[in-house]
Amino acid sequence: MAAELKQIEIEKIDFAIEMFTDALTGKLDAMNLGDVLRVCGLNPSLEDLEKLGATKKPGEKTLTTEDVQKIYIESRKDIKNQGCYEDFVECLKLYDKDENGKMIAAELSHSLLSLGEKLSDDQVDKLFADCLPEEDDDGMIEYDIFLRKMCEKPLPAAE
């Protein structure tokens, strides 16, 4: 298995697993699979995660390092179909009416709540608390700052 991975990929996977392994049990909960893959530079959709064996609730299933390596190898095959920072910038440019790198914060919230793989209100609140730059007097934010912060953080867990 590890023969199909470069040393840097093995190190990334090990680091990601360590970040999300339960300190008490020493096991990786399958609910954290998406976060592990995102730390490794992949961006699987919720549908992909379901197919790969992720669970929605804690305690339903645990994964070994070998399991995660196999899943990583499978996931990276579809990397061309996954969004990246540049793709997100292009999407948010649609809301940049003045072409100045800013958009209305409420439009960003609406987009996250209603388009594509919709986030919950709680997820948007957590994401905004961590990543949203301060609004200007007109309620505008610099979406580049938001995206840079967002792309370096795992997706907040649904409650």
Image: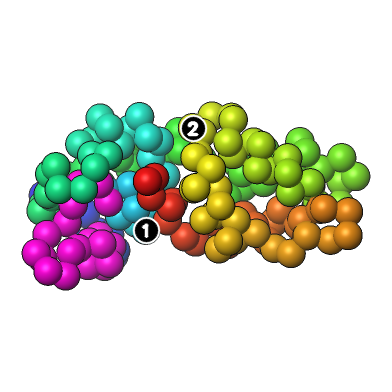
Tell me the crowding category of disc 1: few under 14, some 14 to 19, or many 20 or more residues within 10 angstroms, Cα based. Answer: many
Earlier residue among tags 1 and 2: 1
| Residue 24 position in % (x across, y down) | 12, 69
Magenta segment includes 25: yes
Q: Which mark is residue 39?
A: 1
Q: Is residue 70 above or below residue 41?
A: above
The CA span between labels 1 and 2 is 19 Å
Residue occupying the point 34% across, 53% down: 35
118 or 19, which is in the foreground?
A: 118
Q: Which mark is residue 67?
A: none
- Tag 1: amino acid: Val
| Residue 72 position in % (x across, y down) | 25, 46
Residue range (magenta)? 13-32
Q: Which residue position is annotated with label 2?
A: 117
Colouring mode (rainbow / by chain / secondary structure / one colour): rainbow
Quadrant assignment, res 130: bottom right
69 sits to left or right of 64: right
47 sits to left or right of 156: left
- Tag 2: amino acid: Glu
Q: Are marks 1 and 2 in contact (CB under 8 Å)?
A: no
Quadrant assignment, res 106: top right
The reply to whether residue 68 is visible in this rendering is: no
The reply to whether residue 52 is visible in this rendering is: yes
Residue occupying the point 23% across, 35% down: 52
Query: Quick one: SS at disc 1?
Result: helix
Q: Is residue 39 above or below residue 107?
A: below
Query: Quick one: SS at disc 2?
Result: loop
